[in-house]
Image (cartoon, grey):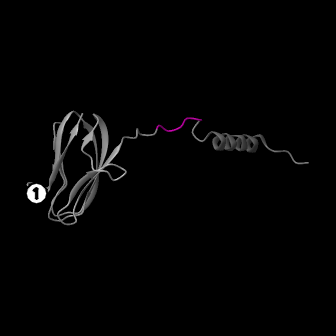
Amino acid sequence: MSRTSPKIALAALLALALLAGCGGGHKAAKPPLYPSVYGSVGPGATISLKDKSGKTITSLKQGKYRFRITDRSTTDDFHLNGPTVDLTTPVRRKMVTSWLLTMNPGTYRFYSDAHAKTLSASFRVV
């Protein structure tokens, strides 16, 4: 019968402890999930802001939201402007971006700077 050396036994115990614990039993904190809204501009003369079910947003409750913007146009931008916000995507560049925003009460407008009179809409935060 062979004897296991104390060093090998200790190494085996440490390996088992690491595998069983994997971080000491603490789970990494997940970032908070915020409701998402989906903005889009282009292709063509279109601009929209919708919820996850695809419904056009006309109002939001005050709070934090993740705005996921898809800009499919090289002639228009997606510009969001309101009491606490003034953000835009670049003109002449298609892109996808995400903004984490705290929305306070008031009226917000989203539009293309190139066609602000014809390519715009608004919503209220209550």
Query: What's the residue type where badge 1 is placed?
Result: Thr
Label 1: which secondary element: loop
Residue 124, position in %: x, y? 21, 39
Residue 27 within the segment the image draws in magenta: yes
Quadrant containing the C terminus in the rendered view: top left
Q: Is residue 10 left or right of residue 44?
A: right
Residue ID at (21%, 33%): 105
The answer to whether 118 is drawn above or below residue 126 in the figure is below
The residue identified by callout 1 is: 118
The answer to whether 70 is drawn above or below residue 86 in the figure is below
Residue ID at (15%, 60%): 76
Looking at the rendering, the stretch of residues picked out in magenta corresponds to: 25-29
Residue 5, position in %: x, y? 79, 43
Q: What is the quadrant of residue 81 in the picture?
A: top left
Between 82 and 54, the one lying in front of the other is 54
Q: Main secondary structure of the magenta part?
A: loop
